[in-house]
Image (cartoon, coloured by chain):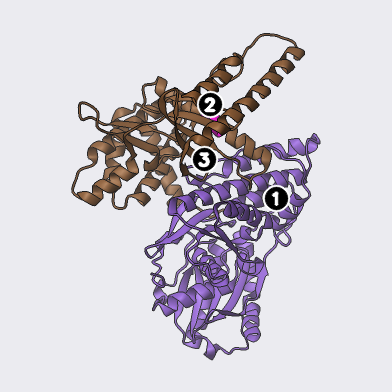
Chain colours: A brown, B purple
Amino acid sequence: MTRSVSLLVWFTKWPRGGSLSMRSRGSSGAADRRRRKAAAVNMSQETSMALQEFLSQAELIKQGAEARVYRAQFLGKPTILKQRFPKRYRHPLLDEKLTHRRTVQEVRSILRCRRAGISAPVVYFVDYASHCIFLEEIVGSSTVRDYIASTRRSDASEDLGWLAERVGQILARMHDEDVVHGDLTTSNMLLRHGLEDGESELFLIDFGLSYISALPEDKGVDLYVLEKAFLSTHPSTEALFQRLLKSYAAASSKSSAVFKKLDEVRLRGRKRSMVG
Amino acid sequence: MTVVIGFEGSANKIGIGIIKDGEVLSNPRRTYITPPGQGFMPSDTARHHRAVILTVLKEALEQAGLKPADIDCVAYTKGPGIGAPLVSVAPVARTVAQLWGKPLLGVNHCIGHIEMGRLITQGNNPTVLYVSGRNTQGGLVIAYSERRYRIFGETIDIAVGNCLDRFARVIKISNDPSPGYNIEQMAKKGTQYVELPYTVKGMDVSFSGILSHIEEASHKMLNSGQCAAEDLCFSLQETVFSMLVEITERAMAHCGSQEVLIVGGVGCNMRLQEMMGVMCKERGAKLFATDERFCIDNGAMIAQAGWEMFRAGQVTELEDSWITQRYRTDEVEVTWRD
């Protein structure tokens, strides 16, 4: 509790800084801007130090290719901390650009989805200096990947069609909001059970590669990425994936254009033409 | 003891190599090089191959010190590749197979690269990054699983090598010895990093965006003196190679793999090898790479894949010995591994 309070104190000490405040659009002079920039850098250094201390006490649950994921308590809530770390093989300018962009995109897309009523974790806090996002932990959830795998192991005949339909629906709503996820896999979807009415809730996570686009081509590629990931991770689930697409079509107003592009991308993979 | 001769001519290189039980006995090769600013046209390439193939065949046998009777099997590239060159090489393979009375084997070009990579580096079960100029399969992350070389990540439009080659044409870089090699040398002198589009979609990459951007913007940037050609080469390499390293790393994380093998023409690039090495070091993984003798298309790699296939009991009947421009790596049943 004390740690999250100290972090919050740094945040509130500088009303202009921090991730959740609006940037001033006043027409102050260059000197003003320099002063504010210096203050922001100062604040971000201090926040980062407090953050490092915070992270050292948190529980590291996963180190992926791009980010370290921790679990901690923040403001009394179970929190997931996702910290993108520098990739040394990249040119430093490229690395900083990419890491920053992915952090920003992730937060923006989550907020955009949530505002449209699509389930995604709440964003509590973001530290842009160290590229760390504080997210609501979806307690009592498992990835859709694990759920499908364990269900098929224990009872091969169980019909997972309801799950495919729910996924199709949530993706349709996301695409209708012009959010392209960019990295759709069954590991990037969470299923939380055990709610009062026996219902389960489906969440989308890991929006680091996401962007805003109305183009059917981009949405088609989004589904193509999921199809490949789905079929390679869960063998012999073609029929299940078809149900997902059917449910998507029913829930989305723009699905025919998207499916046309999906077919084109699939064909590109199968029959690329040779142009030297 | 099994001796296999392999014929490769699916793009602008024509190579014939002989392998005896894991030993490369000979591997001569010729490259069809076009003037700067031009790519190679299929019919001209085929003409080049037809003109030199018998000379290269003689060289292969002489350098190995073998006679036709010593060969056990004739392997050739069935595909993928460019139609005209493929069609100019396959008949020679078919003819010598019939002349010498030896079985014929049609080999997948990409699998040729993989099997040669495995032979040279003795990697256990690496995640393979196949990077070349060929559009059907250039920019592929492959991992072996259950009798198939499964594709995990790929380019959804053009190949990385193709992107580099076409950029070379735009700024008229020489094609001798290869555009990619010259881009690499120029990149070493680059000092300024220019921001270019970076596109990774899930486990796949897209290069057409960065190519069209750089095709449009390069003349403007060079004429205005904003940056030198060397800087563009440097920035292009840094960007496209980062994309490839990223999808390789994702595939490794997905499969739990601790080894990487780079094959294909672009695999000669030292900067790509260097970047992949850094990524591997940070994960505690091992990097395997081959040199230009085997990265670049060559006959011995076809022979090596043929060696594996032959020993597993495969043979290509004459009526099945056609060639195909499109031939996905995961279509082949890998009967020689378990």
Viewed as shown, does residue B242 lie left or right of B174? left
Q: Secondary structure at mark 1?
A: helix
On screen, residue A117 above or below B39: above
Chain for numbered disc 3:
A
Q: Which residue is mark 2?
A: A126
Q: What is the magenta range? A: A102-106
Q: CA distance from mark 1 to mark 2?
A: 42 Å
Q: Are marks 1 and 2 on the same chain?
A: no
Viewed as shown, does residue B30 lie left or right of B4? right
User: Magenta includes A103?
Assistant: yes
Q: Residues within 10 Å of mark 2 (few under 14, many from 20)?
A: many
Mark 2 vs 3: CB contact within 8 A: no
Q: CA distance from mark 3 to mark 1?
A: 35 Å
Q: Secondary structure at mark 3?
A: strand
Disc number for residue A67: 3
Name the magenta segment's main secondary structure.
helix
- What amino acid type is highlighted by mark number 3? Ala
- What amino acid type is highlighted by mark number 1? Ala
Q: Which residue is mark 1?
A: B168
